Structure formats: structure tokens, C-alpha cells
Image: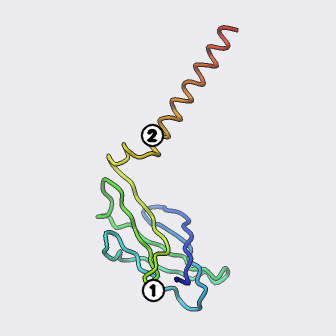
Amino acid sequence: MSTLTLTPTKMRRGVWEGMISNSQTGVPQVTVTHLDKPVPGFELTENKDENLWLLQVPVPVDAIEDGVQIFIICDAMDGTQVGHFTLIAGEALGDDIRVEMELLRAELDMLKRAFRRHCVETA
């Protein structure tokens, strides 16, 4: 069981960020992988005021492509997965449930406007 807890915070300018808390003392030991290969260049920065560590993972350019890309963050001490983040791009989005929900919301908004207009015209 890992002593690390990861809380995702944001992705900005190609860098994913999360906060790591550690129930043990010392620098958290983590690995970040994509397609079972190590992701280079990630950084851990201590936030002494809150006893947290900022994890910054720059997304490699060669990992940005059509489909779903998953980055796995593990505790290097015991191999336990403590979190992950996902990138979705390209044609894979066409079948994604979130895209379908946005289309349904747009259609529902259109129907609501048409119904309200009909009610005003027939009143």
C-alpha cells in the first residue's frame, strides 16, 4: 500500500500538474509512464507551507496523437499506481460519450427554444 496520495490540479501549456502528499518523510519517489515507457522530464517541487509536493509532467510531443493516451503515475517504492491522466484527441472523439452528451445538450437547447417560441405564438 502506497504512502502517497495524488490530487490532480490542472493541465496548462502542455504540462500536467498534480499535488502529492506523503504520509512518510522525505521526497516522494514516483515514476510516470506512457505506453509502458518512462516519461522524461517530470519535476517534483516541495511546497513546505502545506507539506505537499507539486508534480509537473510535460507531455512529450510524440505522445500527442489521435486516440486515447494514458499516463500512469506510480509510487516507485512499491509500484502502486497513485494516479493517471488522459489525453483524448482526433477522430477517437467522435465515439466518445462526452461528445455525444454535448450534441444532446445542443439539441435539447434548440428544442427548448423552439417549444418556447411555439408557446408564445399560440398563446
Residue 70, located in which quarter of the rendered image? bottom left
- Extreme residue toward the right, this view: 123
- Which residue: 38% across, 47% down? 93
- Which residue: 60% across, 23% down? 113
Asked if 120 appears above or below 99 in the picture, the reply is above
Task: Residue 48: give x, y in percent of width and height.
Answer: 64, 84
- Which residue: 54% across, 26% down? 110
Dot placed on the residue nearer the N-terminal end, 1 or 2: 1
Q: Which residue is mark 2?
A: 100
Which amino acid type corresponds to the residue marked 2 in the rendered image?
A: Glu
Cα–Cα gap, marks 1 and 2:
39 Å
Task: Residue 60: give x, y in percent of width and height.
Answer: 34, 67
Which amino acid type corresponds to the residue marked 1 in the rendered image?
A: Asp
- Which residue: 51% across, 32% down? 106
Residue 121, located in which quarter of the rendered image? top right
Q: Which residue is mark 1?
A: 78
Q: Secondary structure at mark 2?
A: helix
Task: Residue 77: give x, y in percent of width and height.
Answer: 45, 88
For residue 49, side relative to residue 100 (left or right): right
Contact, CB < 8 Å: mark 1 with mark 2?
Answer: no
